[in-house]
Image (cartoon, grey):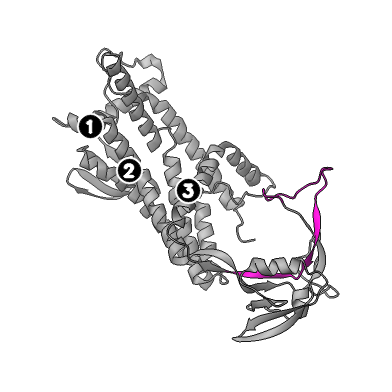
Amino acid sequence: METVLQFILGVLIIAVGLAVSIGLHEVGHLVPAKLFGIKVTQYMIGFGPTVFSRRKGETEYGFKAIPLGGYISMIGMFPPRRQGQKAVANSTGFFQSMAQDAREQSHLTIGVDEDDRAFYRKPVWQRVIVMLGGPFMNLVLAVLFFSITLVGFGTAQSSTTIGSVSACVLPATSERQSCETGDQPSPGAAAGLQPGDTLVSIDGTPIDTWEQSTAIIRDAAGETLPVVVERDGAEQTLSLTPLLTERYVYGDDGKIATGPDGQELTEEVGFVGIGAASELVPQPITAVPAFIGENIGHTVALVANLPQRLYDVAQAAFGSGERDPNGPISVVGVGRVAGEIASIDTIPLASKAASLLGLLGSLNIALLVINLVPLTPLDGGHVVSALWEGIRRFVAKLFKRPDPGPVDAAKLMPLTFAVVILFGGMTALLVYADIVKPIDLFG
């Protein structure tokens, strides 16, 4: 029962954190819009039917039934049909009618003497700031979450404390995961090493990092080494004889290296059968920008290769393949991961908190990157429309041509419609995959 409650707590923490992130994203749009005098009629978290709302001044604040996003409604998002522009005829088709409907709906909320408060009337730089306010807020939240995670808790690094000791030696090709009678004991178990022992020295060399111990063991196959460990506050000396074993040689890309003949390269090294326990090592505040930059780079790469990644997800969901741990994931999958982190008893409380905060930081990076994609209805699409308008007007002024007027962003409604459908399909696929074939991050 305790494990179930911990799982639910993890899910709730991520759910609340995501809701707050979405709400503050919309605040990032709301504040500059009001500062620039744009009339905002609604500030809503979620979509669908309204669950709760309250009007304050000219703006209605509330929550919708489907908590998968949010929005603010500004008057005059699209400019009216220019004088002399042909009206949409009934026979011109669904998409042109959609554009005209968007224009008309955009102007229904404009009252008398409020035209100068319409979004499309504002200078290009103000509209860009309004639309970038939401992603900027997600960046601020990511900086906050990752700063707490890296500086307050730290990153998980291998310590000099032994975290695991293999009971026996199993061949690399063995399908068994447990030892049986007759299996050769591992050198670590034979020497009497135990989880929780802290390495003090090996063969007289003081051990400050786990990599030091690995290097000594790797080069000492068949040699008996005196090992000093600290156990229960006292030092003990044990005799350890690494076993000669063969392992693959890996290149810088993490793949098995091959020789000129194409054969996989191997090397003979010493093997003991012990693993390091990890510990949180606080990082300097200067490490945060680089960490966030790396996270943004990974997210951009994921979005850039989204069609292939979604195809792989579909192959795994409807076939026998496995999910890529670094692939896309839905809010259902994120909630599941958070619940598992919270419910694993072997993870210290500090590590759980750091992992959940890091997860919230990554979610805000995802919101930042996705919203900057230059497609409507995403923020990036509105930014591109405003910038294109600015370029057109600059060129016209440069060559002393008539002002071309505002960009008719309503013409992009068919694209908006297509993007909404694609995002809906992507969400449905990821949710289904996270239910029937969830990503396994914990073995």
What residue sits 43% from the left and 50% below the top?
364
One can see residue 62 in this view: yes
Q: Secondary structure at mark 1?
A: loop
Look at the numbered discs 2 and 3 and tell me whether their residues touch, using CB distance below 8 Å: no
Residue range (magenta): 251-278
Mark 1 or 3, which is nearer the eye? 3
- Mark closest to the chain's N terminus, 1 or 3: 1
Q: CA distance from mark 1 to mark 3?
A: 36 Å
Q: Position of residue 199 (x, y in %)?
A: 65, 76
Q: Is residue 377 visible?
A: no
Disc number lying in front (2 or 3): 3
Number of residue marks: 3
Left or right: 2 as drawn, with respect to 25: right
Q: Which residue is mark 3?
A: 293
Instruction: Identify which residue, 305 or 65, lies in the foreground.
Output: 305
The label number, if any, that marks residue 133 in the structure image:
2
Q: Residues within 10 Å of mark 3 (few under 14, many from 20)?
A: few
Q: Earlier in the sequence, mark 2 or mark 3?
A: 2
The spot of residue 206 in percent (x, y) is 65, 75
* Residue 302 lies in the magenta stretch: no
